[in-house]
Amino acid sequence: MGNIAFGVILAVLASLIILINCVVVLALVRLIWKNHCPSLCFVLNLAISDSLVGFTITGLVNEELSGPEHQTPQRYCVLQMASITCPSAASIFTVILVTFDRYLAITHPFRYFRIMASPVVGICIGGPWLLACLIGFVPVMVHSFQEKNYQGLCTFFAVFQPTYILVVFCVSFFPVFFIFLCFHCRLLKVASLHIQHIRELEPAGLPAACPASQPANDTKALRTVSILVGCFAFCWSPFFVVSIVQIACQRCYLHRLLEHYLWVLGVCNSLANPLIYGYWQKEVRLEICQMCLCLKNKIFPLFHFDSHPDAAVTQAGGPLYIISLAQLKD
């Protein structure tokens, strides 16, 4: 392909995806080791699949920076595109898995831990990965899905047949997005019913704990659903919709738009997932803050500044500042 600017963009994007997801993976591993929470395993699987997306697209960076005269063998290009498709599909499937886990935890809170035993968690994690590997690597096994007139330009649409692309989109994105939207609409309905039930209990003697905070709860639930659904749809919908248009209209040359803009927008979902799901869970935020504080204390053990010297406890080695749990949470 030989587009140096696009190669630099991919390199920066891949580095950010790998770095941020690795931080979230480390925080989730520490939390799972402490709490043994099943729901964190699904978020961990999402972070791992997203980090693999960043790792696999680094191969395209070399392709872009190699110059326009570089020709990629078809077999290598098929393996490379399959390696990118597999973790991308796993990331999309895991988003549904996280949504289903939250739906189950909210609708069946007393049976949740009995249902989500270790074998069930393993099956729920392994199933999407098997399906993602099947979708990603089926062109390697079925040669009819490979483009016969390959010209050495290693892109998704140059190496795969439109039939395979249509199958991937119909199996992965559109059903997944429909299920994703249904689950979150159901979660929003359940949250609204819970808040309505609390309002009905107020005249019966429930302390007027927070009448002012109930609209805020409605707004927060709606905002959370809007961010999750909106980010997923904003990142992947343009690529899949325009891809269907390209398959239906062979005369329309939309490959550059798809491969240099819309596909990159879809990959950005792997960068947004750890930010959304990591920040949305309070324990993950606190664990990352603790990791950053520990790292800071190890790297800069002698440099501690505080605007209130009265709060310091003087020792022989210098001032020592105590940070309470409440301050850490703030």
Image: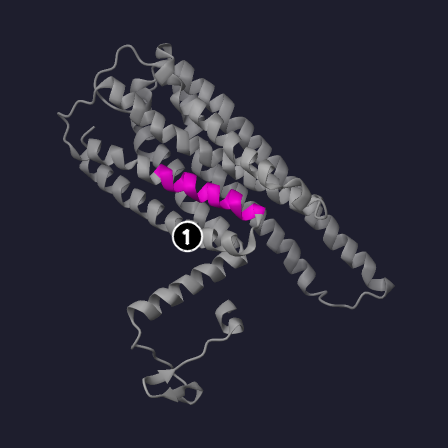
- Quarter occupied by residue 122: top right
> How far from the left and from the top, in percent, is residue 226?
56, 46
Report the amino acid beneath label 1. Answer: Leu
Reply yes or no: does residue 50 show up in magenta.
yes
Residue 71 vs residue 133: left or right? Answer: left
- 36 and 201: which one is in front? 36
Give me the residue at 60% from left, 39% from top: 100
Residue 308 vs residue 76: left or right? Answer: right
Give me the residue at 79% from left, 68% from top: 207
Position of residue 293 relative to residue 251, above or below, is below
Position of residue 157 relative to residue 298, above or below, is above
- 281 and 293: which one is in front? 293
- 18 and 265: which one is in front? 18
Residue 185 visible in the shown view: yes
Position of residue 174 relative to residue 53, above or below, is above
Residue 80 vs residue 30: left or right? Answer: left
- Span shown in magenta: 38-53
> How far from the left and from the top, in percent, is residue 322?
45, 79
- 248 and 173: which one is in front? 173
Task: Return the residue at label 1.
Answer: 26
